[in-house]
Image (cartoon, grey):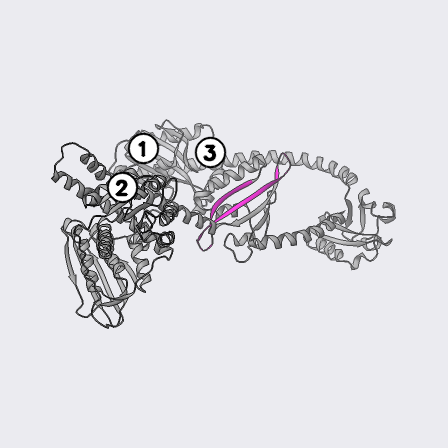
Amino acid sequence: MTPTNTPADEIHRLAILDSYGILDTPVEKSFDDVVRLLSQLLNVPIAAVNLIAEGRQWFKSELGLGTREMPLDDSICKFAILQPGQMIIPDTKSDVRFECNPLVVGDPGLRFYAGARLETSEGVALGTLCALDVKPRPAGLTEQEQFILDTLAQQIMSQIELRKAVMEQQLLFGRQMEIQQELQVERDQSRRLLEGMDEGFVLLDNEFRIRQINAGALRFEAFTAEDILGKTHWEAWPGSEALPLAEHYRRAMKDRLAESFEQHHAFADGRSCWLDVRAYPAIDGLAIFYRDITQRKEAESRWRQTADRLEFTLKAAEIGDWDLDLVNDTSYRSSRHDQCFGYSTPIEHWSMKSFIEHVHPDDRNEVLSRFQSSLATQTDWQFECRVIWPDDSLHWIAVHGSVYGSNIKPERMSGIVIDVTEQKRTEEDLRQADQKKDEFLAMLAHELRNPLAPITSAAAVLSGANIDTLTVRRTSAIIARQAKHMTSLIDDLLDVSRVTRGNVEIEKTETDLKDVITDALEQVRPLIEKHRHQLSVQLAPATATVIGDRKRLVQITTNLLNNAAKYTPDGGEIRLVLATTAETVELSVIDNGIGMSAELICSAFELFSQGHRGLDRSQGGLGIGLALVRSLLALHGGSIVGSSDGPGQGSTFKVELPRACQTGTSDRQMAHHDMRQSQSLRIAIVDDNEDAATTLALLLETLGHQVLTTYTAREALDSLDAFLPDVCLLDIGLPDMDGYSLARSLRVAPATTSAVLIAVTGYAQQKDRQEAFAAGFDDLFAKPVDLPALNLYLAQIANHRLRTL
């Protein structure tokens, strides 16, 4: 394999290349002569001295290329510097590294390459001396040609080293001259500075005798320079030899290292102050500088008290604070700051570089841009970004910083940092929930429009002239079928709403799941036959009795079978298996359909979750079936799990319910209702939806009833006294008076006091029924009205009236 440089190696190599100062310099004849000689000796049209810089390859000399720089991505030489010796490519198109290289497939169409490393005495490769041809050379280079290439490469490297040596010598000479001038200036300035500075200055010899003292030092004292010059420090300031400063001075004198410390000093006259003392080794002695920092120390004490209070506040709010010294590249951070970056204990060093290294790679450019803009404009720095913790976990932080310093140069930046990972997760959860809501609303609109299209078309057919009876029946059947589909969609939505709010009441009786399966198969069989599915049913020989609501159990089984039919291609297989154990009854629906991904399995039982569908959405549905199944099973003390080996591998849904002790035969009711035409009734319809009122009136008239239709509550109150209705079908959402108020008025009116009042409304939950009964209604039918059920109810009313005559 081709060796590669680590990032650290490459940074080191680039630093060495920069130290030669050769990049982006003008052409030089000495390099051009070697390149031309190489071209002639190896008989190649292209030759170059190539230096591999950061992000580019730069040619100190080139022949036949016509450019002095190329992107590093197009470079062939970048591979040559990664291996020892020469790199010879007889045919670049036969080498997988270069077969798609723009210089190979495009202009100039390079086919042959030979390069020798240009490396320092330490073995660091700066680039190559390379020879190239637009024709392949299957034989590569002869031994003599390789010798020529190596020799000329060494010659080039010698010229580079010589060039660097000359450059460094010139720089050194110039610097020596500058130093001599600077030293002379410094001597003059130092003397003036020492005498004019506010700080105290004392020069001690190696025996700690005072050789020089400035005016700044004498301001602290009650004596003159003549009084103490020649005395030792301990003689001039009695008692100082026992102070900590004596140890600092002796150590600085002995080790020849600077000492810096703070000393509280008490004067003989009772005064005291804090001094900031710095002792520097000088020729044959010490140079001591000191200044009064009493006010600073007092301010620091007040600041510490304030900082303690602030630290308590920030800690309570889980806010980390930080202060970055831009001049010295040092920082202060609270422990909470380091915790925001994944460190349970404070780390030793932190800088702007440290921060950037923790930022997620995709966010670094933006963060750096904001940082640099803030420094340039000295404005606040505020943003949110992702950071990588030491354990490689991803977290979000919010940062707010302010820049301080002069107008020319910012000196420090301080601010706060907050871990907002949980907030981001919550935002993402809300975003996904909002997306699911939008997808569901679009899906619901689509599903509701589907049945509206054939209903609209059928209505147009019925409004035409000269239509025969057969056409009327066919169009009526279409309207009824599509209305039933819309009702099913709305019922599913209401079921989900009731279950999620805990408003579903389960009628728990002993129920045989075999009977439940029979009813469910009857409901789903048309869909299975439509898709030519092969259905097999395997029932356990033992009884499979559970305690539950028969209607809801049928709904659960039907939803599972419908789900299998929707997602199994035509002609596929669906198996229903009923098994029992001593404690449970297990119902499994297995198909060989489109299957599920692991991600979909995890969300299959969430509301509005569906597998991938095309734009046609031929299977329909709102994505609430499995969520409803799980919720209804929970009310029965049961559970459901889904599994699949992956997309295209089919799916299995397994239901588990507690098994009941068998106490008798199945409670399956086989009630059959007489759907023959009932006795004629006088029926009043009050509904502000004229189309709904008119179509319901037409249906009731075809059943032999007398019907009066009104569209407002006021119109109904004015006309019902003369009509004397047996039954009133009242819409709740009337414009001038709601249905509840109308029902109360009819209950006290003599003509309608004994009439059967039926509420017809889109609101059919338990609380709506309770409110309707409280207002005087006898029953409530949800829109769209279940016509067979209404006809049966009217027949019961008619039969009751006949028996009471």
Quadrant of res 478: top left
Q: Nearer the viewer, residue 191 or 43?
A: 191
Per the picture, the main secondary structure of the magenta-coloured stretch is strand
To which residue does mark 2 refer?
708
- Of the residues tagged 1 and 3, which is closer to the observer? 1
Span shown in magenta:
381-410
Of callouts 1 and 3, which one flags the residue occurring earlier in the amino acid sequence?
Answer: 3
148 vs 608: above or below: above
* Horizontal arrangement in the rendering, residue 188 relative to residue 338 (left or right): right
Which residue corresponds to the image point at 16% horizontal and 61% vertical from the top-left? Answer: 537
Q: Residue 23: which disc?
A: 3
To which residue does mark 1 refer?
103
434 vs 674: above or below: above
Q: Secondary structure at mark 3?
A: loop
x and y percent of residue 676 in the render? 16, 52
What's under tag 1, amino acid-wise? Leu
Mark 1, Cα crowd under 10 Å, few <14 / some 14-19 / many 20+, is: some
Quadrant of res 188: top right
What's under tag 2, amino acid-wise? Leu
Give the CA separation, mark 1 to mark 2.
Answer: 90 Å
Q: Nearer the viewer, residue 611 or 549?
A: 549
Give the CA separation, mark 1 to mark 3.
Answer: 23 Å
What's under tag 3, amino acid-wise? Leu
Q: Secondary structure at mark 2?
A: strand
Of callouts 2 and 3, which one flags the residue occurring earlier in the amino acid sequence?
Answer: 3
x and y percent of residue 172 in the render? 58, 36
